């Protein structure tokens, strides 16, 4: 979700495919509302997902006869380009991105509702991720969150609370009983599990469980979390000088007993030959920790002229075979719990369980006004630049003003 992915640039071939993929991937023998089996659907995928989607497309084509053109795009501007091109009748038929773009895409009228089919096959959090305003706008294929990762060479404890985590880590006698990335601008994504345990969600929810634009950060739980940040900073547990790279390397070097990170780093730990376990994030407050959950999904362009073909693709993606394929290719837990549970990969199983109990990251447009103020405030508290209560109160006011202006 909030982790950066280094851009690899757009390949020259992707540029030529994009040029050929105008009018939402239509061809001469296609008409609005559908196409025959000789048509081609165009999918945009970012640098990270491109090769995965290409392999999935090969399987789909082999089973359906429908051709798929996968175009590689830069993650940093793919959604902006999509939003610009779709109203003109250009762009792809489908696009694959995280669910947190959904609110903006719906607001801009560039994605179309789709039939998810048997929702019971998917985890609740995955269904919520593709739902906006009571309608489903795509098919999910993977769930992702952070977890507490333990170095089994240093300890075998399974701490339920943050205090227990520190006690266990200190007994290991290493430089960092616990380490978590923060940096000079904070990292609300990695810290949200702890924040949630104080009963401090970002937004309130309506009767259907969907996020509203009403802030919940200003309630008592938010202040309690801010004070906790200060306490941990004073105890030298949290530090803004700990960047993502520093936290990762310290854990790789055996200098930390525990860290909070996601599957992207767990894979690196495994590759380095480390014996690690993926555990639920321990609670720092009185409630269970619920880290943010990000859901990967395929969206359909509101202007696609290939809806019969995209429906075939969605039907395939919603099968256990399609979900298993993406799980194997991407190394992320399937949006279908049964598929994740059947995996021989214990990390996938663990992340699936954690995600099912996590909190869906908000996808409403108002969330864009939150991240910067939120992260900078956490960093200011931990660095000692601002008092926790005052800093948190000012943050809430700034976020509310930013939301109101938009």
Image (cartoon, rainbow, N blue to C red):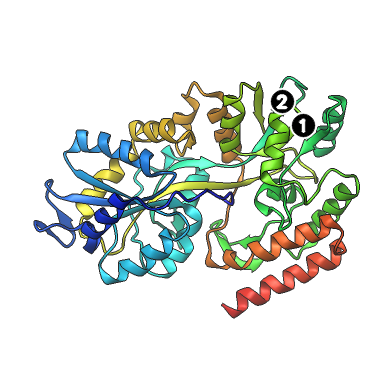
User: Which residue is disc 2 drawn over?
Assistant: 151
Q: Are discs 2 and 1 less than 8 Å apart at CB? A: yes
Quadrant location of the C terminus? bottom right
Image check: 305 left or right of 266?
A: left
**Residue 406 tag number:** none
Callout 2: SS: strand
> Residue beneath label 1, please?
256
User: At 69% from the left edge and 66% from the top edge, which residue is drawn?
Assistant: 373
Task: Identify whether 375 is placed above or below 158.
Answer: below
Q: Is residue 393 left or right of residue 24?
A: right
Does residue 280 sit above or below 237 in this rendering?
above
Identify the residue shown where x is 79% and y is 36%: 178
Which percent across, then down, holds residue 20?
Answer: 21, 57
Residue at 56 percent across and 31 percent down: it is 267
Element carrying mark 1: strand
Return the residue found at the far right: 234
Picture layout, residue 161 above or below residue 276:
below
- Locate residue 327, reporting x and y percent: 43, 33
From the top left corner, tell me how far across and down residue 358 is, in percent. Answer: 61, 44
């Amino acid at each position: 979700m909030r982790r950066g992915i280094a851009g690899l640039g757009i390949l020259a071939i992707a540029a030529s495919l994009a040029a050929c993929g105008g009018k939402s991937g239509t061809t001469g023998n296609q008409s609005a509302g559908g196409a025959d089996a000789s048509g081609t659907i165009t999918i945009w995928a970012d640098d990270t997902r491109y090769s995965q989607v290409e392999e999935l497309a090969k399987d789909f084509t082999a089973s359906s006869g429908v051709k798929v053109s996968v175009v590689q795009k830069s993650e940093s501007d793919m959604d902006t380009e999509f939003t610009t091109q779709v109203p003109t009748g250009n762009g792809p038929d489908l696009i694959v991105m995280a669910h947190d773009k959904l609110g903006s895409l719906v607001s801009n009228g560039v994605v179309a509702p789709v039939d998810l089919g048997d929702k019971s096959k998917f985890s609740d959090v995955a269904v919520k991720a593709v739902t906006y305003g009571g309608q489903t706008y795509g098919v999910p294929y993977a769930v992702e969150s952070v977890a507490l990762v333990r170095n089994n060479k240093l300890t075998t404890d399974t701490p339920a609370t943050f205090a227990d985590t520190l006690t266990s880590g200190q007994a290991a006698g290493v430089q960092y009983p616990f380490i978590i990335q923060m940096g000079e601008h904070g990292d609300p994504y990695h810290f949200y599990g702890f924040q949630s345990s104080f009963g401090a969600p970002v937004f309130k929810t309506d009767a259907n469980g969907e996020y509203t634009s009403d802030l919940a950060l200003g309630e008592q739980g938010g202040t309690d979390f801010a004070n906790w940040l200060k306490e941990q900073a004073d105890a030298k547990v949290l530090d803004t000088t700990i960047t993502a790279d520093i936290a990762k390397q310290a854990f790789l070097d055996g200098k930390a007993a525990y860290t909070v990170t996601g599957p992207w780093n767990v894979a690196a730990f495994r590759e380095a030959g480390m014996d690690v376990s993926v555990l639920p994030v321990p609670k720092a407050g009185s409630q269970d920790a619920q880290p943010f959950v990000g859901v990967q999904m395929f969206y359909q362009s509101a202007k696609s002229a290939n809806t019969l073909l995209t429906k075939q693709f969605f039907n395939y993606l919603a099968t256990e075979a399609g979900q298993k394929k993406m799980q194997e290719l991407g190394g992320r837990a399937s949006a279908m719990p049964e598929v994740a549970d059947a995996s021989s990969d214990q990390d996938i199983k663990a992340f699936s369980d954690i995600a099912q109990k996590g909190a869906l990251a908000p996808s409403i447009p108002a969330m864009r006004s939150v991240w910067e103020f939120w992260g900078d405030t956490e960093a200011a508290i931990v660095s000692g630049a601002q008092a926790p209560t005052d800093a948190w109160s000012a943050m809430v006011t700034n976020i509310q003003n930013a939301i109101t202006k938009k």
